[in-house]
Amino acid sequence: MHVPDGFFDAPTSAATAVVAASAIGTSLYLARRRELDDRTAPLAGLVAAFVFATQMLNFPVAGGTSGHLMGGALAAVLVGPATAILCLSVVFLVQALLFADGGITALGTNILLMGVVTVLVGYGVFRVLQAVLPKRASLVPLLAGLGALVSVPAAALVFVGLFEVGGTVDVPLGTLASAMLGVHVLIGIGEAVITAAAVAAILKVRPDLVHGARRLPTATPLVVRTSPVATPAAPAAPTGGEA
Amino acid sequence: MGAGHGHRLHFHGHSALHRAAAHHKVLALLGFMLVVVATPRGWWWAYLAEGVLLGGVVLASRVPLGFLARRMVVETPVLVFAALLPLIAHGERVDVLGLSLSRSGLEGAALLLVKATFGVVAGLTLAATTEPQALLAGLARLRLPHQLVQIAAFMVRYLDVVTDEMRRMRVAREARGFTARDPRHWGVLARSVGALFIRSYERGERVHLAMLARGYDGRIPLDLDRPQAPAVAPRGHGHAHGHAHEHAAAPVPALLTAPAEHA
Amino acid sequence: MSTPVLDVRGLAYAYPDGHQALFGVDLHVHRGERVALLGPNGAGKTTLVLHLNGILAAGAGTVAVSGLPVAKEHLQEIRRRVGVVFQDPDDQLFLGSVRADVAFGPHNLGLRGAELDARVMTALEQVGMAEHVDRPPHHLSFGQRRRVAVATVLAMQPEVLVLDEPSSNLDPASRRELADILRSLDVTVLMVTHDMPYALELCERSVILHDGTIVADGSTRDLLTDDALMARHRLELPYGFDPRTVGPAPGRAPAPAAPAGPTG
Ligand SMILES: Nc1ncnc2c1ncn2[C@@H]1O[C@H](COP(=O)(O)OP(=O)(O)O)[C@@H](O)[C@H]1O
Ligand SMILES: [Mg+2]
């Protein structure tokens, strides 16, 4: 759920907005420098549209309930963490302003919780596992899935923490934490399976698109073959003599 | 295109609110909601005043109330959460219809509902009275980083294209008798997600190539949406009507007016 | 003999994933010609097109435009000279209004103010879309978007217009309108197409690209009537279409009001 206006008190909203803004500033710098250069605007824009579309995709969880993909870990593994943060931030911005989904005063909170936290935790887990495990492309989907699995409950926990500090209703911490974790572990499993399978499907077709599996392109020597150019049966007379 | 996408939130109109500058509207929305959020519990008269103000603005926008009401479904998850609050919150209990509820939870839920509803109504009114393009230009005027505005512009431009592709994939799945009903179907959904990513990313690459082909150098000018010449169009194409804009174009260097001829 | 507008020699290219798409392409196109580039799917046609204005850099061989080599230091000038219309107009119309999309190229060339407005309107008039100047591209029909895509390129007043499958996905009326527009332009044209009647109608000369090399070059009518050649390169005429019985292709329509393209 997108955090609406009035969910957290004003200081918490302001503080999360500051954190989100600095995360975006850092990502702007890093995305341009390390990930996408002048392709940033069109590619990140299309990836943002993709994230928006996948967030509309509901997956059935259990007993008639369903969750939707958050896409933080998926985006991070696919396009790199900085670009992913930009894409998700823009998704929340557009959702708030064009769809009234998520409050405008809670924009920073939403970006922080569902953008920055899911990306950093998801990508962090992915990278740490990649560092300790053998470097094989076949492991990338599994690691991406594990990153996604952890990222969803992590965002839920940060939400609980924020609620404890700046919530507008006095709710027992334990009750809230266990309820949120319970639901989000389930959603996290769905997110994990879908993330892993989606990354695997992409690796099969365009391995070069998966940031988390990036490798130097192999330089193969070019083959040049000259086949005789057929001139069709009847003599042709193109303008200007051809070689 | 453009029909049945459910996310076309703009409602064409000519009210004062439609004509107001987008960046003023965004600032007004933000300011209003900050006041709402900061209004202390118990100041019921203040909430009443805010509600009356918001209601007046909505009426002035002449956006049909039914149009807004149908789009308020985005608030559903908040309703669910608000309904749970009185059950789990601390403090003094009161009995309502045989349920033991927390008084502070009830109050909190009521307050959350009021604030969130104000936010959704105000946000929907902004969306209904502002073209996405104008909104993007407004964000640029509010000094949102250029790159972020650009990303948002590309996202808005291709939102229909991408969601349409996703919808077609779903139709294709369903045409072959597949509907996702339980977790065993996650794999199929995931393959659609993977395919959608590849299509989106490859389109991004092609768009980038198309930009390069027309001399893109990393900057996208934001003000190409209007005629560039000062107010009266010299060539009399009559396309400058209704676009009162204050930006006088720089005089054209004589060099650039030379015919583009090459040896 | 004049310098060819497009001069491609021994062009070979492999994509970053190692897949080689071009294996030594030789192609010359002279000023004022309209040439059809035919070939089955995956032949490398789009890849070749992307080399003509330096979007892809040759792995081996050279490309020159009116004598100017396609190389990093000339990219700006090359992209002004060679206008590429991409296959999917949605890829080419990425801004919020028709005006902005058509203005994007000339703006990057340094045009401003009234000069820029005039360029935009002239290009839109050439494709008959002037009245739609303030509409968002995604509200236009597919055929209209294809025409605006052509205008985005005409606004740069290119010496050579390269079109990647311009008639694909068009209904018959839009296809006809586009043919009329192309015929009215006074500019060199290289047109990638699967649409053999279109090639015959618009282009005197055709070349066939297959597996990354040019395998045939000659008059369109002769190529299309050489059944063995056509079959060898997986090219097929639409059912009922016989190039032998079609009248001579209409000549270039006299361009009335001063056209945008420079004359050679
Ligand atoms: N970005 C790419 N990366 C790798 N291979 C590509 C890419 N684009 C095209 N190819 C491959 O290069 C070959 C030529 O493609 P293309 O030039 O698009 O063919 P055509 O336009 O004639 O149908 C095809 O085998 C295609 O799969
Ligand atoms: Mg092609």
Image (cartoon, helix red, strand yellow):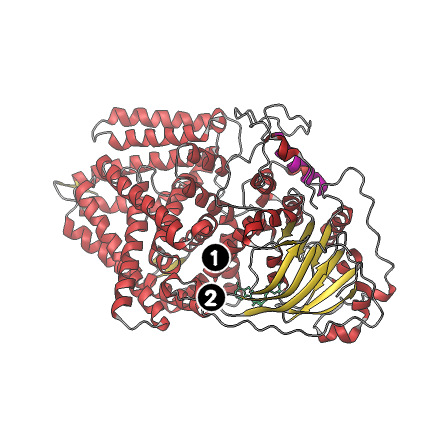
Q: Position of residue C138 (x, y in %)?
A: 57, 45
Tell me whether circle 1 and circle 2 mark residues in contact (CB < 8 Å): yes
Is C3 situated left or right of A237 in this image? left
Q: Position of residue B57 (x, y in %)?
A: 41, 26
Chain under disc 2: A
Q: Secondary structure at mark 2?
A: loop
Q: Position of residue C15 (x, y in %)?
A: 52, 65
Question: Number of callouts in the render?
Answer: 2
Residue pictured at 33% horizontal, 64% vertical: A144
Is A174 situated left or right of A200 in this image? left
According to the picture, the residue beneath numbered tag 2 turns out to be A206
Chain under disc 1: B
Question: Toward which corner of the image does residue C106 lie, by quadrant?
Answer: top right
Q: Is residue B71 magenta?
A: no
The span picked out in magenta is C114-127
According to the picture, the residue beneath numbered tag 1 turns out to be B201
Is C152 rendered above or below residue B46?
Answer: below
Question: Toward which corner of the image does residue B55 lie, by quadrant?
Answer: top left
Q: Give the Cα separation between the discs numbered 1 and 2.
A: 10 Å
